[in-house]
Image: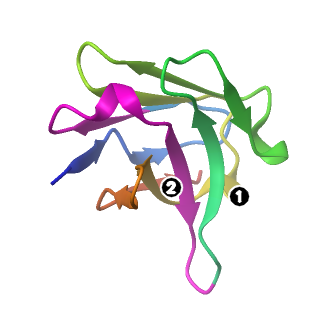
Amino acid sequence: QVQLVESGGGLVQPGGSLKLSCAASGRLFSLYPMGWYRQTPGKKREAVAVIGSGGERTNYAESVKGRFTIARDNASNTVFLQMNNLKPEDTAVYYCKMQGSVGDYWGQGTQVTVSS
């Protein structure tokens, strides 16, 4: 069983930065793609950024391109999301996901609030 634990969320002013981390348990981390997703009340969960198992491939939502960077450290079973130039519309609960071979695993989420 894989467990994912996000951290790093909080309150930040517009234009500020935050770095989210997601730590995974178990030995499967380096085998599978990882992603960051976000959700606001009343809306569907949306993909923000995904990264291949080796870290060589990344993909971003248009709304965050040039501002967010996803990275992973397979030695420590951790995936990161560096968020710069944050905007109020980035406010959401952010979740990490492991895209497993037989199903997906999700973390519990971390709140990011961008407000002055």
Q: Would you say residue 18 sits in the magenta stretch?
A: no
Q: Quadrant of residue 39?
A: bottom right
Q: Residue at x 54, y 18 (%)?
A: 55
Instruction: Mark 2 or mark 1: name the one nearer the start of the chain.
Output: 1
Looking at the image, residue 29 lies above or below residue 115:
above
Q: Give the crowd class for mark 2: few <14, some 14-19, many >=20 residues within 10 Å.
A: many
* Quarter of the picture holding the N terminus: bottom left
Q: Where does residue 78 sit, x and y in percent of width and height?
A: 31, 27
Q: Residue at x 59, y 69 (%)?
A: 45
Q: Where does residue 108 sit, x and y in percent of width and height?
A: 29, 62
Looking at the image, residue 71 lies above or below residue 65:
above
Q: Rounded to the nearest whole Å, what is the CA distance between mark 2 and mark 1? A: 9 Å
Q: Quadrant of residue 65?
A: top right
**Are the two marked residues, 2 and 1, in contact with CB atoms closer than 8 angstroms?**
no
**Relative to the observer, which residue lies in front, 81 or 105?**
105
Residue occupied by mark 1: 89
At label 2, the amino acid type is Thr
Q: Where does residue 101 sit, x and y in percent of width and height?
A: 42, 50
SS of the residue at dot 2? strand
Q: Which mark is residue 5?
A: none
Residue occupied by mark 2: 113
Region in magenta: 20-42
Q: Quadrant of residue 26?
A: top left
Residue furthest toward the right? 62
Q: Residue at x 66, y 22 (%)?
A: 57
Looking at the image, residue 100 lies above or below residue 74:
below
Q: Residue at x 52, y 43 (%)?
A: 35
Q: Would you say residue 34 sits in the magenta stretch?
A: yes
At label 1, the amino acid type is Glu
Residue furthest toward the bottom? 42
